[in-house]
Image (cartoon, rainbow, N blue to C red):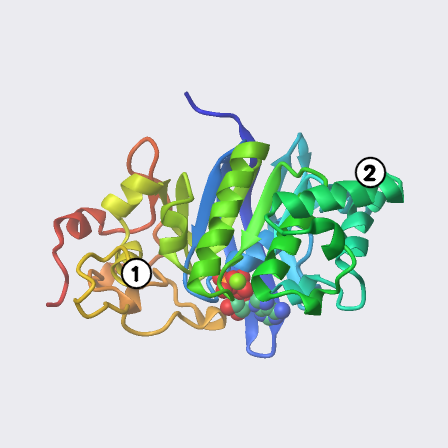
Amino acid sequence: MKKEALLSVRDLTVVFDTHHGTVRAVDGVSFDLAAGETLGLVGESGSGKTVSSLALMGLVPSPPGTVERGSALFEGRDLLALPARELRRVRGAKIAMIFQDPMTSLNPLLTVGRQLTEVLEVHLGTNRREARRVAAARLGGVGIPSPDERLDAYPHELSGGMRQRVMIAMALMCGPSVLFADEPTTALDVTIQAQILDLLRGLQEKEGMSIVMITHDLGVVAGMADRVHVMYAGRLVEAGPTRELFAQPAHPYTRGLLASVPRLAGDPNEALYAIPGQPPDLARLDAGCAYAPRCAFAVDGCGAAVPPLERTTEARLAACFELARVARGEESHA
Ligand SMILES: Nc1ncnc2c1ncn2[C@@H]1O[C@H](COP(=O)(O)OP(=O)(O)O)[C@@H](O)[C@H]1O
Ligand SMILES: [Mg+2]
């Protein structure tokens, strides 16, 4: 049975005015997020993952950025059309975000406790004493030892992993129904990375929120996401249930991404694959498929038009003119 969408994004398009020209950072992105599901949003650096989430949070820096088109229905309202005041009420309360680098969102001058309680005071009008109690409980809930004492610590007094836990606690203060986690473990070493992912998994089970897990690393979404969306050059190029998509990637780009993940590529002694070339300059995109210049399956026609994202099975979508040949593994040039 298909679950009703909690967040329904249609045709999201975000442009930046730069001195190289107009950059289409996010171009016609549509997706549904069901209640309680984890959606992995993957793609190389610069593919538009962060900007997509910033747009839904109303945080695209403007100028130079503009949300050019699109809608994002959440609880019957279009987030992209909400007046700033109302959006502020939703942001942080019902939709929250955690970032790769906690120091960009934690205020170095305020204690951890002050930053956590402020969220509750602003959004829910909770009194300070009660807010402090909730804050300590939240810190305990994200695995921070002696939470009462930690409330009086400043961010720089904590390790990177502990700061990331504080960020997560802060994002969860008001019990959001959607959490954008933007590369939440990229800055951490592997052991801590695994702990934070475990923590997010556990929290999701307990709180039942939806998570959009943004990462350049398919390995991170493997054990976490119900579905995966793959972005390339500002567009969605493939979407589907995680297990199916990993077992049988349809789009050449997804195949390339999977082949470049050591934990997923199979034999650890085999030389690791790297997708040849670089992502395109978004200010100078050609008329055709943005991946064609790097694609082993590309033929002349791929340069003529952008392939639309089309349904290939009930649960899967892909944007490629040559899917049948790709599935048979017939590369254009050996
Ligand atoms: N503040 C900005 N000014 C100009 N261009 C930007 C800005 N932020 C992002 N971009 C453009 O948007 C593209 C997508 O960025 P981003 O969403 O951060 O990528 P990622 O997938 O790594 O999160 C970048 O490649 C860049 O061209
Ligand atoms: Mg990013």
The image shows residue 285 at horizontal and vertical percentages of 43, 68
Nearer the observer, 89 or 324? 89
Mark 1: secondary structure:
loop
Which is more N-terminal, label 1 or label 2?
2
Dot 2 corresponds to which residue? 124
Left or right? Give the position of 35 relative to 248. Answer: right
Residue positioned 63% across, 60% down in the render: 163
Nearer the observer, 29 or 39? 39
| Quarter of the figure with the N terminus | top left
Instruction: In the rendered structure, find residue 79 and report the number of the disc placed on it.
Output: none
Mark 2: secondary structure:
helix
Q: CA distance from mark 2 to mark 1?
A: 43 Å
Residue positioned 26% across, 56% down in the render: 252
Instruction: In the rendered structure, find residue 261 and report the number of the disc placed on it.
Output: 1
How many residues crowd mark 1 within 10 Å: few (<14), some (14–19), many (20+)? some
Give the amino acid at mark 2.
Leu
Residue positioned 78% across, 54% down in the render: 113
Give the amino acid at mark 1.
Val
The image shows residue 269 at horizontal and vertical percentages of 17, 67
Is mark 2 in CB contact (under 8 Å) with mark 1?
no
Left or right? Give the position of 192 relative to 110. Answer: left
The image shows residue 206 at horizontal and vertical percentages of 56, 33
How many residues crowd mark 2 within 10 Å: few (<14), some (14–19), many (20+)? few
Asked whether residue 23 appears in the rendered view, the answer is no
